Amino acid sequence: MIKELAAVDFLKSQIKRFPETAIILGSGLGGLVDEIEIQKRIPYTKIPHFPVATVEGHGGDLIFGKLEGVAVLAMNGRFHYYEGYDMADVVFPLRAMKLIGVKRLIVTNAAGGLNEDFEVGDLMLIEDIISLLPENPLRGKNNEEFGQRFPDMSEPFDLDWIEKTKSEADRLGIKLKTGTYLGMQGPKLETKAEIRYCRIIGGDAVGMSTVPEVIAANHMGMKVLGISVITNESIPKVAKEFTHADVVAAANRAGQKLVELVKAVL
Ligand code: HPA
């Protein structure tokens, strides 16, 4: 908590009024930044104790501004467990955001489609998560100021927000898939046998992010919305070799749909 407070003190010296809505931008989805009327951009390297992003396709700054007239804070570049951070570091920015008054979180990511009905470029509204990560950000002594020891996770995503997103997607003519996001540690991609396993246990999309943030946000009582961009098909029959560059390129292509949808939802 002390580290988070130092980051918060610094942010308070930079920004007068804090947004209540935060958006985490996934791999290749930084295009949303172009739509933000930017008031302040703060590189992570300037913020005390903030981890520094290492993955290609991720920037590394906090962006304060307005999107569709709504004050937002965008995290351009996120922290993944596979990069070697502790879980506390992975969710550090989110906890700092809570302390500056963020109440709502929109989390986005690039993911592999496990569901046979999904195609590359689809958007999937995340209705639930499965964690196959080896750790949990809430492990250790509970900080009661953030939330309770055993937070309820029966509805990790806000139902009203889900309904609103579905109706806005309809209105915009955006085909929106829904499903369960399965979080893996990575950084390796899944074997065919793992893909079969992920499908059997109920995953519709697989990725290496989002789950820690959704857990920490629920712990802190934030309202959460999650959207995946399907960047490759992780289906045994069709699964073919792909690279991180393919993921980023597919996310960039589908990014505009995501931007339209997020703007409409705001
Ligand atoms: N697996 C894990 N993470 C991913 C994938 C995938 O197929 N695609 C994008 N991120």
Image: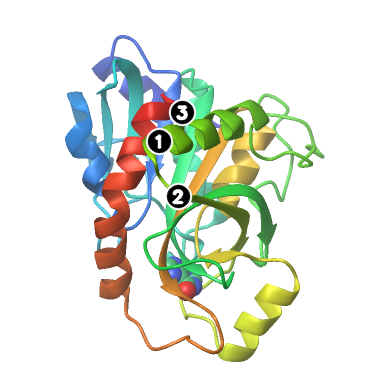
| For residue 22, above or below residue 115 | above
Q: Are marks 1 and 3 in contact (CB under 8 Å)?
A: no
- State the residue in front, 196 or 170: 170
Q: Residue at x 21, y 33 (%)?
A: 35
Q: Regarding mark 1 in the picture, which secondary structure is present there?
A: strand
* Element under disc 2: loop
The residue at which mark 3 appears reads as 97
Amino acid type indicated by mark 3: Met
Taking 100 as reference, is 150 left or right? right
Kindly identify which residue carries mark 2.
175
Viewer-nearest residue: 239 or 136: 239
Give the image location of residue 39, x and y in percent. 18, 20
Mark pair 3, 2: CA separation: 32 Å
Relative to 33, 151 lies left or right:
right
Classify mark 1: residues with Cα within 10 Å, few (<14), some (14-19) or many (20+).
many
- Residue density around tag 3, few if under 14, some if 14–19, many if 20 or more, within 10 Å: many
Considering only order in the chain, which callout, 2 or 3, is on the residue closer to the N terminus?
3
Residue 55 as seen in the image, left or right of residue 111: left
The residue wearing badge 1 is 23
Disc on the earlier residue, 2 or 1:
1
Q: Quadrant of the C terminus?
A: top left
Q: Which mark is residue 180?
A: none
Instruction: Pick whichever of labels 1 and 3 is earlier in the sequence.
Output: 1
